[in-house]
Amino acid sequence: MLVAVVVGVGSFFGLLTVLFNISDGFLSKDNKPFAIFIGLVTIVGITLFLLLGKIIYKSFKHVPLTLGIIFICCVLTFPAIQAGLNFKDSYRNSYAKDHTDKYVSQLQTIFTKDKSPIELDYEQSNYETLYYGDLNRLQFEKNDENTLTTNEIDEMLISLPINNKGYRVSIAFGKYYPEYKRKVSSITIFLDQNKKPTSCYVDNKNNSLCDKYKKE
């Protein structure tokens, strides 16, 4: 019966693949031949599994129970995956709130002493770095409403100590909007472990800021 559980889970992913390829949509694309192929493979797989059971047990008496297990597992696979993801998210959220990242703490010391107009958002940087765990996710904000310059960005990047992970550096700048409780303009620069820029994103109004930080 354990194999029936596996078949049920496989049927779910087969059905999901069919739904994502049967027509164009927000999360799907029109690839009907592939959808039909996967659908046939799923049906043939279930049929062969039932026939194998008949050969082993020399009877079809287990077919209704087996089909029931396959159906139930197919239906419950998505809720089980969602529950697992929710548990993982809750754990990561709790861990990020209750722990301190050593690198971000080091930066807090550096930028507390620094007179740069760009300030570190310690709490958000610490939370995102621990929550995602893949990069040093650093949040900064310019403490005035003057235009952000590449010289200011360069000085801030130079201040970052080398670390064994890459960087995602976001800087909020420009006018502060009370209704949003933040500055609406921001630039995000991705860097590798050696602090070499790999990509950059900014709003169209300030697009020239990214020219220097795009990978050639």
Image: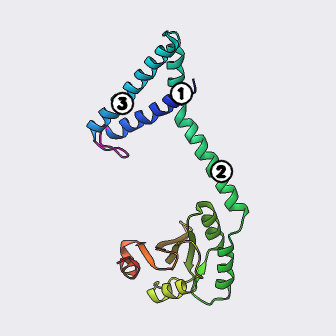
Q: Real-space Cα distance between discs 2 and 1?
A: 31 Å
Query: Is 2 situated above or below 143?
Result: above
Q: In which quarter of the image is the C terminus?
A: bottom left
> What residue is shown with label 1?
3
Query: Is 27 situated above or below 95?
Result: above
Task: Characterize the local packing of mark 3: few (<14), some (14-19) or many (20 or more) Cα atoms within 10 angstroms.
Answer: some
Q: Real-space Cα distance between discs 2 and 3?
A: 37 Å
Mark positioned earlier in the residue sequence (2 or 3): 3
Residue 98 visible in the snapshot? yes
Q: Does the magenta stretch include residue 27?
A: yes
> What type is the residue that disc 2 sits on?
Ser
Question: Which residue appears at 58% of the width and 37% of the height?
Answer: 80
> What residue is shown with label 3?
41
What secondary structure is marked by label 1? Answer: helix
What secondary structure is marked by label 3? Answer: helix
> What residue is shown with label 2?
90
Question: Which residue appears at 28% of the width and 42% of the height?
Answer: 30
Residues in magenta, as a range = 22-30
The colour scheme used to paint the residues is rainbow
Q: How many marks?
A: 3
Mark positioned earlier in the residue sequence (2 or 1): 1
Residue nearer the viewer, 207 or 179: 207
